[in-house]
Image: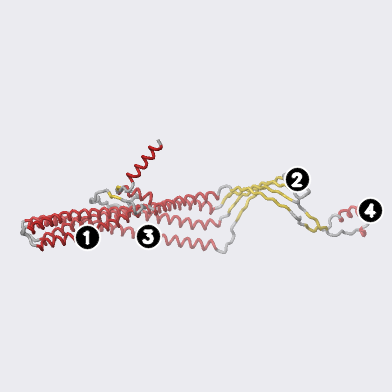
Amino acid sequence: MRKLVSIFICFWALTTFGQTQKLTLDDAIDYALKHNAEIQNASLAVEGSKQEVKSIVATGLPQLSVNGNFTHNVQIASQQLPDFISPAVYGVLINEGLLGPDRFQAGQPQTVAFGAPSSLTAMANLNQLVFDGTYFLGLKAAKEYVHLSELIQENTAITEVENVKKAFYAALITGQNSDLLQQSLVSLEKTYNETQEMYEAGFVEKLDVDRLAFAKANLETEINNIALQKQILMHMLKVAMGMDVTTELELVGDISEPSLVNANGYSLDNRIETKLLKQQLIMDSLNVKRYKVGYLPSLRLTATYQQNSFAEEAEFKGLGNTWNPGTSYGFNLSIPIFDGFYKKAKIAQAKIDLDKDKNTFINTQNQLRFQVEQAKLNVEMKRQNLANQRHNRSLAKNIYEISKIKFEEGVGSSFELIQAETDKTQAEISYSNALYELIVANIDLQRALGTSQPTN
């Protein structure tokens, strides 16, 4: 069974290795959404902002730590104390009349050492935030930052998908133009062969044959150039998708006139740029409040539980045998009084940033309206250009058919036929390019209206 599986895998690898992958526009978009580096980084930024929220939440949860401490006093620190024993003893004797006051003499100061040779301490500390205005506001700001990161991710996806669409259509149009040139070359080679036979039969001049040969050579050069251009565009598409540029691809799809977007009744609120700026204004407002709540007091609860063990006589004798507990708790209240006008300056600076972003928002709204009007005019211009190129293509085709008939009947020149063939091919390419320009203009109009989505 293992041998059969190995043989199957080897056979599958041999049959699939080096095969050209077929790619539709939907496939290209799906691949870009999963592999484009900019989109991936934007997704990671969203995840990072979510982790930032968790870290801020954690600062408000109970903080518990356990500590252990061992101390060995090689020499126990000594302190000098006054003679407090002699006055007490002599005081009793004097009070009982056993000793006269003139007989009292105080002793000399005594040097004593307090402490155990060794000690062992185990301690658990609890720290809990009870109230801090900056914490709760920071938590809200962090959640708003997550939303900002999500909007940035959406904006990145929209932009990269638009780039993929434009690159896909550019490569597809170029391939279509290459096919048109190939068809023209086949037709020209047929005419050249027929003319060569007519020349050998004495019906046409050598000049007619040479003109067709010259035209055929120029067309072959143009085909080679457009083939290289297509390779470059294919590489651009792969880079936009996040795909290895060495991957062999075959684009699948038809180029047709797009359904133009309805530009009536649009709203700038649909633009991702508007959403981003509004979110930035929210962040600026929270930044102002952040410094204002800095004037509020903060309160923390602290609690400690510990166990202590001391050596009895020798350095380590009895250490750990007996444990002495200790428990305490307390509150830490911090009331800001004066900070040298630091928070006042920060509040003023935050308000300035807020006003600047408000001005940016107003100016951007006007620019977005301009983009809509510009995109609408551009679509109309490209639509008219496509209609003109469609008409020119029809005329060029009719002229070529007539010129070919005239040449075959001996009443037309080879120069006229070559020119008609060139004009027909150029008209086909011009129509394809005009179609591509209309498609791109329609994509730009969708972006201007805010109807672009990170999908096809």
385 to 30, vertically: above or below: below
Mark 4 and mark 3: Cα distance apart in space: 101 Å
Evaluate if marks 4 and 3 touch, with contact meaning CB atoms under 8 Å apart: no
Sequence-wise, the earlier of marks 1 and 4 is 4
Q: Which residue is mark 4?
A: 98
Q: Position of residue 412 (x, y in %)?
A: 7, 60
Q: Earlier in the sequence, mark 2 or mark 3?
A: 2
Residue most toward the front?
3
Give, as a three-letter code, the residue at label 2.
Answer: Gly
Task: From the image, tell me which residue sits under label 2.
Answer: 318
- In terms of secondary structure, where does tag 3 sit? helix
Point out the tag, 4 or 2, that comes first from the N-terminus: 4
Q: Is residue 307 or residue 406 the one in the foreground?
A: 406
Pointer 1 residue: 221
| Above or below: residue 89 compared with residue 415 | above
Disc 4 residue type (three-letter)? Leu
Indicate which label's residue lies in the foreground, 2 or 1: 1
Image location of residue 299, percent across then percent down: 59, 52
State which mark lies toward you, 1 or 4.
1
Residue 362 badge: 3
The numbered mark, 4 or 3, whose residue comes first in the sequence reads 4
Q: Earlier in the sequence, mark 1 or mark 3?
A: 1
Looking at the image, is mark 2 or mark 1 earlier in the sequence?
1
**In which quadrant of the rendered view does residue 280 lie?**
bottom left
